[in-house]
Amino acid sequence: MQKSSIARRVLAAGSLVAGVLVAAQPAAAAEVTYGCEYPRVCFYGNSTDASHKRNPTAGYKDAGYWQNLGPNSRGSYAVFNSRRDDTALLKFDLAGASYTMCVPPRKYFHLNPTEYPGRVMKLMISDNENC
């Protein structure tokens, strides 16, 4: 038998074993609520998706500092905090002044401009469990 034939058989057997080992490991299921994957704070950019709690347009997971929201989250209609132990602080622009609102863990809020002053502009995820 030629060396190349033996090498092909060894490689094929190794690939088969590796494939079985990979297939035997269960896939980690992502926890998703309202289309928001844990551990994110998700924003819903239009009133239809906000009212149906679906299709977030942006999600953030970094914690500990104020983040300027991008065009897919700034001025959103709703927010969902999928985190279990962290609060989400939202900063609104109110004609040059700012207003801060706290979203507890695992809570969903409509940010309808008629109910809340200004537009949500910044987010800080805090390790505080309570608002």
Image (spheres, rainbow, N blue to C red):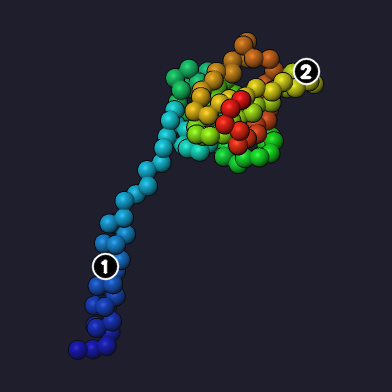
Image quadrant in which the N terminus is located: bottom left
Q: Would you say residue 102 is visible in this rendering?
A: yes
Kindly give the residue lying farthest to the right in the view shown.
Answer: 96
Query: Which amino acid type is marked by label 1?
Result: Val
Instruction: Write the residue at 24% across / 77% down.
Output: 9
Classify mark 2: residues with Cα within 10 Å, few (<14), some (14-19) or many (20+).
few
Q: x, y percentage for residue 81?
A: 53, 29
Q: x, y percentage for residue 64?
A: 66, 40
Q: x, y percentage for residue 80?
A: 52, 27
Query: Which amino acid type is marked by label 2?
Result: Ala
Q: Is residue 56 left or right of residue 32?
A: right
Residue for badge 1: 17
Q: Would you say residue 46 is visible in this rendering?
A: no
Kindly give the residue lying farthest to the top in the view shown.
Answer: 114
Instruction: Write the residue at 60% across / 30% down.
Output: 88
Q: x, y percentage for residue 35?
A: 44, 31
Whether 50 is drawn above or below 12: the answer is: above
Q: Nearer the viewer, residue 48 or 130?
A: 130
Query: Where on the picture, by quarter, is residue 112?
Result: top right
Instruction: Write the residue at 58% across / 27% down.
Output: 130
Kindly give the residue lying farthest to the left in the view shown.
Answer: 1
Image quadrant in which the C terminus is located: top right
Instruction: Write the residue at 31% across / 51% down.
Output: 26
- Mark 2 lies on a secondary structure that is loop
Q: Which of disc 1 and disc 2 is earlier in sequence?
A: 1
Whether 3 is drawn above or below 131: the answer is: below
Residue for badge 2: 95
Alpha-carbon span between mark 2 and mark 1: 64 Å
Query: Where on the picture, by quarter, is residue 19?
Result: bottom left
